[in-house]
Image (cartoon, rainbow, N blue to C red):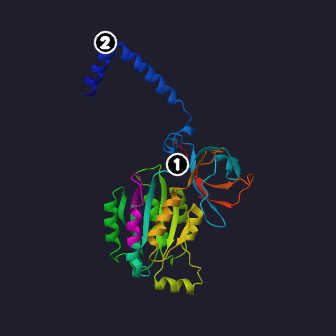
Amino acid sequence: MRQSHEQTMRRSIVHHPDISRLLLCLSVTLLAFSSTPAQEKDPVDVIKVDTNLVVFDAQVVDKKTGHVISDLKKEDFVLTDNGVRQTIDYFSRDELPLSIILLLDVSRSVRPIIHDVRDGALNALLRLKPDDQVAVMTFAVRTSLAQDFTKDRALAARKIQEATETDVLGNGTMLPSALQEAAFHMESAKTPNSRRVIIVVTDNIAPAGDKQTLDDILESGAVVYGLITRAAIGKVFNVVSFGQIKAVNKYAEETGGEVMGADKKEVDDKLGVMIDRLRARYAIGFRPSDMSETGQFRPVKITVSTAKQRKEKPIVLTRRGYYQRKRS
């Protein structure tokens, strides 16, 4: 059918010279557009086409108030790769679609408020945009994928309800292994150029993390956000430990995320705040000047230039580096 259609079109053009001239003009116009430099394309095209471009997702907040700073320009940032200053080749604050893994703690210490956690997670789905995708994972001693990445909000909601009604995953809170499995699963996100986020809803009473888990999260390109909400037993543990059990905090800090506290009735609102803040992040890209190493972790530091005086004290929240891989 396609061949027949093309033959028909060619015959039409032969008999209609005006159409031939029109198509010639359109071809020239499209050719001109195709010569646009890569950094002027939208974020998805840049990441897909320019394989040497390394893009960091960054949040800028006022150190004193925690308020998001959203009026910065490319020239306001300074970026170093392995200690060497780099040229920022790509800069955007466009709202990329989100790929979110909702990682829900269903351990014994959270079960007394599990319905509040569930209801907050369900309401958070309503704040997502049509292009956003969400996966649902639950964890205690073991981790389970309740729902793979989907844009079907009703399906995700049903799986959240089902997953929070059981205690088959055990009583303990093995957060490091849960985060590691979430990082592995992030690779299956159906929109590879989206903003990747792991949102952990937990009481944060869990073992400390390990370097391998953090490396796996960094390699996945995900940012970790933690929402801390506690039942009575979690509050007791927090007092007894003098507030020193902060399992998710290190992961959030190292990946450029944030940790927020929430009363059991605030889960919905705080998740909404998180999603809004995620949409206010900057995308900052550069082409490494040194491509000699492969497979090595490269520390990256992004700061706001002090050349311009500001009332705020801006700090940049972003992942601490990337793994340089040999490009095919």
Q: Residue 190 placed where, x, y %?
A: 40, 51
Mark 2 element type: helix
Residue 4: in sight, yes or no?
Answer: yes
Residue closer to the observer: 9 or 212: 9
Which residue is the site of mark 1?
94
Q: Which residues are magenta?
A: 118-134
Check the image and report above or below for 169 versus 181.
below
Check the image and report above or below for 61 versus 175.
above
Q: Residue 212 placed where, x, y %?
A: 54, 65
In space, the residues marked 2 and 1 are separated at their CA atoms by 46 Å
- Residue displayed at 49% across by 82% down: 234
Disc 2, disc 1: CB below 8 Å?
no
N-term mark: 2 or 1: 2
Q: Amino acid at mark 1?
A: Asp
- Residue displayed at 49% across by 41% down: 45
For residue 149, which quarter of the picture?
A: bottom left
- Residue displayed at 48% across by 79% down: 230
Which residue is the site of mark 2?
15
Q: Residue 261 placed where, x, y %?
A: 53, 73
